[in-house]
Amino acid sequence: MRSDVIHTLLVANRGEIACRIFRTCRDLGITTVAVYSDADADALHVREADLAVRLPGAAPADTYLRGDLVVAAARAAGADAVHPGYGFLSENAAFAAAVQDAGLVWVGPPVKAIELMASKTRAKELMAGAGVPLLAPVDPATAGPDDLPLLLKAAAGGGGRGMRIVRELDALPSELLAAAAEAASAFGDGEVFAEPYVERGRHVEVQVMADAHDTVWALGTRDCSLQRRHQKVIEEAPAPGLDEALRTRLHEAAVAAARAVGYRGAGTVEFLVSAEGRPYFLEMNTRLQVEHPVTEAVFGLDLVALQLRVAEGEPLSAPEPPQPSGHAVEARLYAEDPARDWQPQTGALLTLEVPEGPGLRLDTGYTGGDTIGVHYDPMIAKVIAHAPTRTEAVRLLARALERARIHGPVTNRDLLVRSLRHPDFAAARLDTGFYDRHLAELTGPGADRDPATAALAATLAEAVRGPEAVRGAEAVHGAETVRPTRPGGPAPARFGAWRNVPSQPQRKRYRSEPDGTEHEVAYRTPRTGVPEPHGTPGTRVLTATPDRVTLEVDGVTRHFAITTHADRVHVDTPDASYTFTALPRFTDPATHTAPGSLLAPMPGTVVRLAEGLAAGVTVEAGQPLIWLEAMKMEHRILAPASGTLTALHAAPGHQVEVGALLAVVQEDPAATPVPVPVPEETA
């Protein structure tokens, strides 16, 4: 028996990608080993693995980024191979070397290839020698007006960290300092380089797969232009709208890049394609990509299985890859609020149900009942659709997302659906500025939404639950106590926490989440016992049960599925989903926050304060004051008004919960603001 055959594989990762790799291992008869932090003790990837090893701690730096602990875990579990997944240590040459030094099979490229591509500046020099098209670098020290706009990038990392767009020369020195500081914090290397910023450029990449027998496959193109904070949101294969000559050039450049570093395994060569159709090398990711499922769908391949095959020393099955078929689109479902500066969301994921069917695939690291924490990336799942044409694949994916039941933290689901149906996306007018131009319209009120009718359905479902449910609701909402109508007599029947007096309509108040719009619903309960809407002409109740309501609205029958969790009510329809918070009859003055209070929008860590920030200084409206780090991103807390900082409760290193009071600004329109020198928003 060959010594490099893999029998037991440890995945040095977590969440969705670990579950994805385990799925292939089960198909191949390979025993699986998970590693997990304390925060992930009950995570899905731990539950799905055959064996699991704890990495003590919660923060990535103490767990998934500790290569020594991961190697020790592999030895303890009897693993003979390690797959790095993506992120964390997947492109760390020292970790790859440590795995091999321990006598384990490394399911990844050669250490030398990782080293050569680890620095973007060195990689570009190497690619120039291989004839790969490049953007000419710009020396920031000699940059002039003709060089603008410039893009500053961290040499040692990706994911948008350390990246800045500079449009004015006066801003260049401060932006260089800010980019270098963030790069050093994120990657331990503050090297930053500059290159021309290509306006309206497309992000197009080529998947490569190489073996140790001199075969390199170029597995088509992917378009990943729809990005937020330089991180991908929607990806598709093949990249639409490219002529055959450009596709050929991209494939040839990707193969040349792989051969230049003696590559083996799965990798991705990323390009920026200008509006004129000129490609420029960006970087080579020496690992599996998040968006690999669209390539798998189009080529009918399992890239993880091919990674394992190559790691075992086997050749690829043919000199050329199989022929592609159809089109595939992937959407990343994030726990985040796009309308509020993409703020990550945390909490219990109560329900996660995505429709199944031909052409649909779900890759996820969560199930309903799991908790989305603060330590890791906020991606919940990837939903992939494959169909004969792009139009069909986009339509299938949008409809699957629309019909999904997702209860818990706010997600970007509505943004994804609207993006897929946007005219520019439908016409393949794609570039990395898509969300800069369209975010407001994509997150604004939609003509296709009807929260008032959804709130009515929620009210009717609660009304028919009966007194026991109502009493439970009263405990949650703090409703008034019902006294007997006579001494010793029974309490009257109640719906929605108000007396059932047939002559008066009963009312229920809800707040839409996350936009905060309030809705008041009135209804009556006649002798038939079936509640009827009050004050909504054209609406008739057909059926009403505690979990399902059917209404006829202006002659059209509509169905509503109702799910209640404490004071949250989730209403799912065939074409939209709504979340409401049930409100008490009377507002509580104690819940109001003093004007000018800066509250933590999410749980996280205070990483820094604006220079010179202290109680008593004057600040300007919109000025960044405090930086929070949560779920791999930094977020700015801005001054709500011009005035005086009267209180400061935040300090670097503090862990804060959502809603924690960070500072207070007392508005003073006559104050002369003292500018605080700060960098721009980080990604």
Image (cartoon, grey):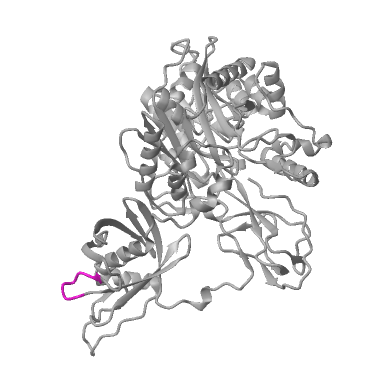
Question: Where the C terminus falls, by quadrant?
Answer: top right
| Residue farthest left in this picture | 528
Q: Position of residue 127 (x, y in %)?
A: 67, 20
Q: Position of residue 288 (x, y in %)?
A: 52, 28
Q: Does the magenta segment cover residue 132?
A: no
Residue 574 to residue 136: above or below: below
Q: Quadrant of residue 656?
A: bottom right
Q: Does the magenta segment cover residue 527?
A: yes
Report the residue at 39% width, 75% height from top: 478
Of residues 72 and 367, the one nearer the viewer is: 367
Report the residue at 37% width, 60% height from top: 450
Of residues 605 and 52, the one nearer the viewer is: 605
Q: Position of residue 429 (x, y in %)?
A: 52, 37
117 lies left or right of 4: right
Q: Looking at the image, can residue 447 be seen?
A: yes
Q: Where are the magenta residues, as a range?
A: 526-532
Q: Position of residue 351 (x, y in %)?
A: 37, 50
Residue 459 to residue 155: above or below: below
Question: Where the N terminus falls, by quadrant?
Answer: top left
